[in-house]
Amino acid sequence: MPKQRDVQAQRELLSNATWQVLAEDGLPGLTLRAVAERAGCTTGLVMHAFPTKKALLLHARDLLYERTAVRADAAEAASAGAFGALEAVLGQAVDLPHGHHEESRVWVGFLAAALADDALAERHRAANHSFLARIRRLVAACRPEWPDERLELTTKSLVGLVEGLNVLAAADPAAYPARLQLDALAQALAELGPVS
Amino acid sequence: MPKQRDVQAQRELLSNATWQVLAEDGLPGLTLRAVAERAGCTTGLVMHAFPTKKALLLHARDLLYERTAVRADAAEAASAGAFGALEAVLGQAVDLPHGHHEESRVWVGFLAAALADDALAERHRAANHSFLARIRRLVAACRPEWPDERLELTTKSLVGLVEGLNVLAAADPAAYPARLQLDALAQALAELGPVS
DNA sequence: CCCTTTCCGTAACAAGCGTTACCGTAGCAG
DNA sequence: CTGCTACGGTAACGCTTGTTACGGAAAGGG
């Protein structure tokens, strides 16, 4: 039983390197050699941890979704009441404590890649549907009397606003600072507040 | 005075081909050969019309901005009153009569490219600032009594919502149909309606 | 009708890509 | 300490990329 490795740890390391390259150099700069260099290894290791570049991208995309889901769970659990949870979950989506713009840039990169790759597109849709379901559940808890149609409209409006602000901030941080994003979110949430 | 060509018409043709390739094959498929094939010529013509690939992308980006500005002007001119103009301009941004998803895909592609290219990023910012100024002017006409801060917040919220819905619809058309986008826009515009 | 001059398709270039094959090597079993 | 085996770095492969150089063709002036 000679040398053994931790395949899962390697994949996580490489996925993290993928994010960093994607955030810094964008989609055209996302090459296996750049990822390997960022991870401190060579393409040999990358191709032993993943069969192909697409597999690496899919794993990195899945890991991004898992981490955002964990963060949203934490934000929701740390809040009191449905409205507070809604504020917390959406708020952390537009104002991450660390590396916010970086994550938005990564998100845009994956989105652009998904427009040309069905597998990536499906992961994007799954992640977005999961996020939509979470927000819809919280909105329904705030306004139990609302019919399904209004629930869906408000949910998708909130998600659209948050993702739109993130996307615009990624390309123009000066025009969309964190404070403005939070204010915009608060204004959008006004109709859902506990005191109607 | 031998053979002469219409350089401007060639550039427009190639920029249109660039959009089509970008919409269909995404950013990774945007190669000079693909653009040339789509335009019905060879790379020779492309490199004679533009000195480099980046120049082609910049021209295509500028042309996209000009056309959206023309459409917005037309929508604004055809409307009665500031609120009607606001509805028309934002409405045509989320529900284009022809090739809506295609244009959103192109927009996402240029955005992703801009994250790695300063020149493209500056064009994106300029276009977005122009759109912001237009919306802000119309919002101000609807609510002259509002202070600058609220004007800016509402303007950027509206633009964020519209662009967010467009981006999400580009990757998941089934979840964000045109009707839902228009309803979401109408809800966001409710506070600006002529009858308060 | 010819000639000149511009245009543009052809084909090659170097560089970089994802991927593959190979072999030195590092680490555990005995 | 020795030997075996999975690991991973090296280097090459074929392909595609953006870009360049060149030559045939086409069109307007004399």
Image (tube, coloured by chain):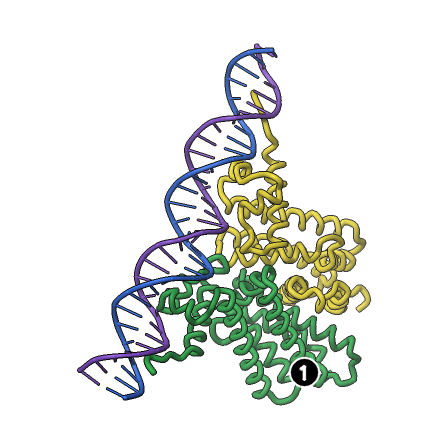
Chain colours: A yellow, B green, C purple, D blue
Q: Is residue A147 visible?
A: no
User: On the picture, is A15 further left or further right than B50?
Assistant: right
Q: Nearer the viewer, residue B38 or B7?
A: B7
User: On the picture, is A38 further left or further right than B147?
Assistant: left
Residue type at mark 1 is: Leu
Q: Chain of mark 1?
A: B
Question: Circle 1 is placed at which residue position?
Answer: B138
Where residue C5 sits, quadrant-wise, is bottom left
Q: Position of residue B145 (x, y in %)?
A: 78, 84
Q: In the figure, A183 relative to A104: above or below?
A: below
Label 1 Cα neighbours within 10 Å, binned few <14 / some 14-19 / many ≥20: many
Q: Nearer the viewer, residue B1 or A104?
A: B1
For the C terminus of chain A, the image quarter is bottom right
For the N terminus of chain A, the image quarter is top right
Q: Residue at x 42, y 67 (%)?
A: B47
Secondary structure, mark 1, is helix
Q: In the figure, B62 relative to B37: above or below?
A: below
Q: Is residue A135 visible?
A: yes
Q: Position of residue C19 (x, y in %)?
A: 45, 42
Q: Nearer the viewer, residue B162 or A106?
A: A106
Q: Residue at x 68, y 58 (%)?
A: A101
Q: Position of residue A105 (x, y in %)?
A: 63, 57
Q: Residue at x 53, y 40 (%)?
A: A43
Total count of labels: 1
Q: Position of residue D6 (x, y in %)?
A: 53, 26
Q: Residue at x 57, y 55 (%)?
A: A110
